[in-house]
Amino acid sequence: SNGYPPTGNKPRTFIVIISNTNTTTANKLTSNYLFQYGNYDKAYGAYFEGVQYSGKIGMHYWKTWFLGSQRIDNQFKILTFTYDGEKDSYYVNGKFAGSNLVNLNTENKEPLNIASRLGSGNGYYGGDIHELLVFDGALSPDLMRRVENFLAVKQGHPRVSSHTNFKLSTEGE
């Protein structure tokens, strides 16, 4: 990697660990961002609707978006967003939460914004972001579970419940 998130239609995976999302006095906008980068009409990011709307988590491409089945709350969450070149999917604590068929064309004009949207910096996320990992490429389901389990143990939380066919030591091997 050259230090920038993947652009164009390149596969990518983002893993974000969040907790303590303020659902009473913050995160009241229609769109509250965990991260976003690109250009105004060619962007990529994760967000959720304010809790007074649906509170659902999804992906935002600036002019279009999709919301999955999971709602934001104040609990610890490992959110994995992966794009394979055709389909953008996300998982909450290892469980599938939604997908969207989309042809991305993300630009690298604006840097990766963490806890806000591009440009003006509004749409702030009110809560704790423990870690944000960016991968060049779509991780395989097995590798996603390994990384998610390593991060859960590292943060002192139970392992992701939907992993199969492997065991992960506390050292992450």
Image (spheres, rainbow, N blue to C red):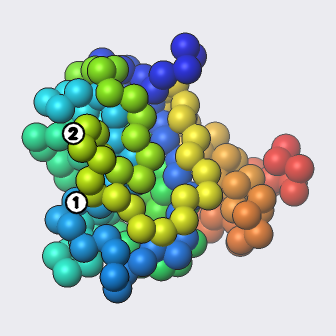
Q: Is residue 8 visible?
A: yes
Q: Is residue 10 left or right of residue 4?
A: left
How far is mark 1 from mark 2, CA to CA? Answer: 12 Å
* N-term mark: 1 or 2: 1
Query: Residue 31, labelled with which disc?
Result: 1
Residue at 10 percent of width and 40 percent of height: 63
Give how far across and how far down residue 154 sits, in percent: 77, 59
Give how far across and how far down residue 171 sits, in percent: 89, 50
Q: Is residue 34 left or right of residue 30?
A: right
Q: From the viewer's perspective, is residue 82 above or below residue 38?
A: below
Query: Residue 61, labelled with which disc?
Result: 2
Tag in front: 1 or 2: 1
Answer with the quarter of the image where residue 113 lies: top left
SS class of the residue under badge 2? loop
- Seen from this angle, which residue lies furthest top? 2
Q: From the viewer's perspective, is residue 73 above or below residue 169?
A: below
Q: Is residue 69 left or right of residue 127?
A: left
Answer with the quarter of the image where residue 48 lies: bottom left
